[in-house]
């Protein structure tokens, strides 16, 4: 994953929508790495000794590693990967990754009458801020979509990403109520692998490396993954890259050669060959189909 964060300006019109995304980002913390990242604005930075009080809500998804969390209404507890943490305005809190594992976190900051109403109706409570939902690909994709939406910053983006934020809350609330996190070990491994593949779409990565990070044998991993998804890990990773490629091809500022490089293909020729095999069109023809000829080739 690529470390990223953005703090957004919010207009009065955005506030009238009823829900606003104030900030979002993702951070990879290595074992023994410094935490929090010191480049955040002063009003969001904190240290373990003092903790922090926010005037907004935040939703954090821990997808790798583990750590600890505590707040005014919640005693200190171990947080494992697959946990959603909800931060409440006016509630002092502190959290940090384990020095031996580090962690990966995705987050959004929110405010608005919609989320105020959800809290008032006790859908989410300061006494229960940590919800274990497991490694859920749809939750991960919603976070990624919100983050990608802030990178473009086009007019009217707030209703779009705040709508995704409401979808996010509904999704993890439903998961927590249905106890869908009670998965078998193989389901957890496969879902962890899916997140690994999606978060490494723009890196040199492999199914063998995924098995190594998951601490399982590759032969067993390949068999279980294919049984669960219908695809081998390699086929799934290629599919993820193709999804990212189609997204990038909609950006007129990226050339096909740049896209091939960003997705770590050995050459633009090989990228075009794989793209046509999986999509039935060359990247150039795909671009022409979706938006005409105003693109870099």
Image (cartoon, rainbow, N blue to C red):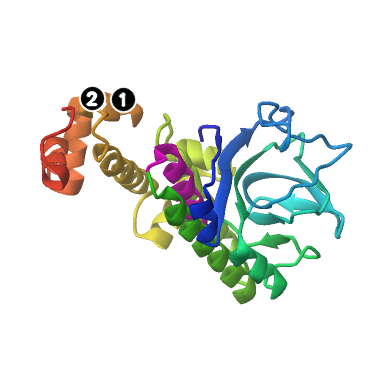
Q: Where is residue 43 in the image (x, y as percent from the top left)?
A: 73, 36
Q: Does the residue at mark 1 contact the one at mark 2 (Cβ under 8 Å)?
A: yes
Q: Which secondary structure, mark 2? A: helix
Numbered label attached to residue 257? 2
Query: What residue is shown at x 43% (from left), y 33% (from top)?
Result: 205
Which residue was labeled with disc 1?
261
Q: Give the range drawn in magenta.
A: 138-154
Closer to us: 37 or 208: 37
Closer to us: 123 or 228: 123
Q: Which secondary structure, mark 1? A: helix
Q: Where is residue 91 in the image (x, y as percent from the top left)?
A: 81, 54
The answer for how far apart the CA atoms under marks 1 and 2 are is: 6 Å
Query: What residue is shown at x 71% (from left), y 72% (from top)?
Result: 120
Query: What residue is shown at x 46% (from left), y 42% (from top)?
Result: 150
Residue 190 seen by the camera: no
* Residue 136 sits above or below residue 102 on the image: below
Q: Position of residue 128 (x, y in %)?
A: 77, 65
């Amino acid at each position: 994953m690529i470390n990223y964060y953005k703090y957004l300006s919010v207009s009065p019109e955005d506030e009238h929508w009823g829900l606003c995304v104030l900030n979002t980002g993702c951070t990879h913390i290595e074992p023994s790495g410094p935490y929090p990242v010191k480049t955040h604005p002063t009003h969001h930075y904190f240290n373990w000794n003092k903790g922090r009080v926010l005037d907004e809500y935040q939703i954090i998804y821990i997808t790798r590693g583990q750590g600890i969390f505590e707040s005014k209404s919640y005693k200190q507890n171990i947080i494992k990967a697959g946990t959603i943490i909800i931060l409440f305005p006016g509630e002092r809190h502190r959290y940090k990754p384990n020095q031996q594992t580090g962690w990966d976190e995705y987050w959004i900051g929110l405010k608005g009458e919609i989320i105020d109403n959800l809290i008032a109706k006790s859908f989410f409570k300061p006494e229960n801020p940590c919800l274990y939902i497991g490694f859920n690909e749809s939750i991960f994709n919603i976070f990624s979509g919100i983050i990608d939406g802030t990178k473009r910053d086009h007019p009217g983006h707030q209703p779009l990403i705040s709508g995704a934020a409401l979808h996010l809350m509904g999704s993890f609330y439903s998961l927590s109520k249905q106890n869908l996190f009670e998965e078998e070990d193989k389901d957890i491994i496969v879902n962890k692998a899916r997140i690994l593949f999606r978060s490494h779409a723009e890196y040199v990565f492999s199914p063998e490396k995924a098995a190594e990070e998951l601490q399982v044998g590759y032969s067993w991993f390949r068999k279980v993954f294919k049984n669960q998804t219908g695809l081998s890990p390699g086929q799934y990773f290629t599919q993820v890259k193709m999804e990212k490629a189609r997204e990038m091809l909609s950006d007129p500022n990226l050339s096909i050669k740049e896209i091939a490089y960003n997705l770590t293909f050995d050459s633009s020729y090989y990228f075009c060959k794989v793209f046509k095999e999986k999509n039935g069109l060359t990247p150039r023809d795909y671009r022409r189909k979706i938006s005409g000829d105003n693109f870099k080739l």
